[in-house]
Image (cartoon, rainbow, N blue to C red):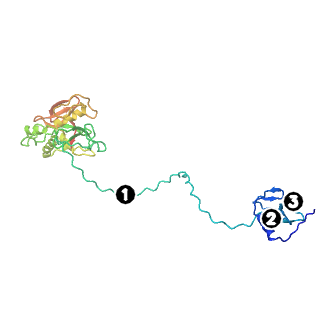
Amino acid sequence: MSRLRKSRSYSRRSVGVILVVGVLAGLTVGSGVGVIATASTKTVTVCANKTTQVLRYAKSGTCLSTETIVVLNQTGAKGETGAKGNAGAKGDTGNAGAKGDTGNAGAKGDTGNAGAKGDTGNAGASSPTGFTARSVCGAGGITLCAVGVQGPGGGTIVYVDSTNEMPGYDYLEVAPANASYIAWSTTTAHCGTAAATGCQSAFLSDASTALDYIGLGTGRAATAAIIARHNAGGVTKADYAAGVADAYTTVTASDWFLPSKDELNEVCKYASGTGQPAGAAIVCTGGALLNSFSSTGYWSSSERAYYVAWLHRFSDGYLGSNNKKSPLYVRPVRAF
């Protein structure tokens, strides 16, 4: 039997069958079964029996003369775009990214305005002895003053008046160096009760007044009294012990004077490192003399008799007197 390729008109029924076949994903052809993938773009040939209208798959692509050949294109026309679906659920938050490098420091801001001044604090309690601890010592002037500490005048603190033995003063400071080696007074005739006797052979005024210039805190007044007598005679300060001490200066102080007998006793305790308690009742003795002090005697501003004045020898603690005309060392002190 010959096979012919013919085109012909179909009844509505035939066309309907073919259209139904075209949309199927698989076809049953004759006595066999063939599965055709709908996603393919290839054409499919089927044969329709002209009498029975039964379709069969033509694997070879040809039909019998009793059949009508039908070529099917598996890919249909592109349908319309469907409606937009609903938005999906929000996904989980991703992990944080790595920390970035630290940026460069910003420019320094302008200095702010000064703050308001604080309220004045309450006054401190008054010491029962009148002593006030002061932090004005040391190289920077902010250290608490104590024996052995540098004083504000550039010397060394040798006495702390915690028991008020020096009215008007709390500390005694000795000069950093000797000022001179000189006589206690000159022969100027302006001493004695009549202020007409030579000062080397008479009290400045009288024995009673001399006793007022022995204790702690009296050296400054004693120095002033000696200077007054010598000034009356026109004597230069460089010629006698009290005048030299009064003229002595350091970078930070000019209020030095010749120490009294009891003030010189406190200088001796420091100079010899005796470690003895402070106060006039304890006389300096023992210890080892510091290199900055002389082993011979030092003048005080205190008179012992009309022709002698008190001296102190630091090397052995000797406390005595010497003629006013004799030379001895001068070591100024100051009180504050």
Mark 2 residue type: Leu
Closer to the chain start, of discs 2 and 3, is 3
Horizontal side of 83 relative to 118 (left or right) equals right
Q: Give the image location of residue 37, x and y in percent.
A: 77, 58
Residue projecting furthest to the front: 52
Alpha carbon distance from label 1 to label 2: 91 Å
Kind of residue sitting beneath label 3:
Ser
Please state if 291 lies on the left or on the right of 327 as rendered. Answer: right
Which residue appears at 80% of the width and 58% of the height? Answer: 28
Residue that badge 1 annotates: 112
Q: Residue at label 2?
A: 72
Q: Which residue is mark 3?
A: 60
Q: Quadrant of residue 286?
A: top left
- Residue found at x 78% / y 68%: 16
N-terminal-most mark, 1 or 2: 2
- Nearest-to-viewer mark from 1 and 2: 2
Q: Quadrant of residue 202?
A: top left
- The quadrant in which the C terminus is found is top left
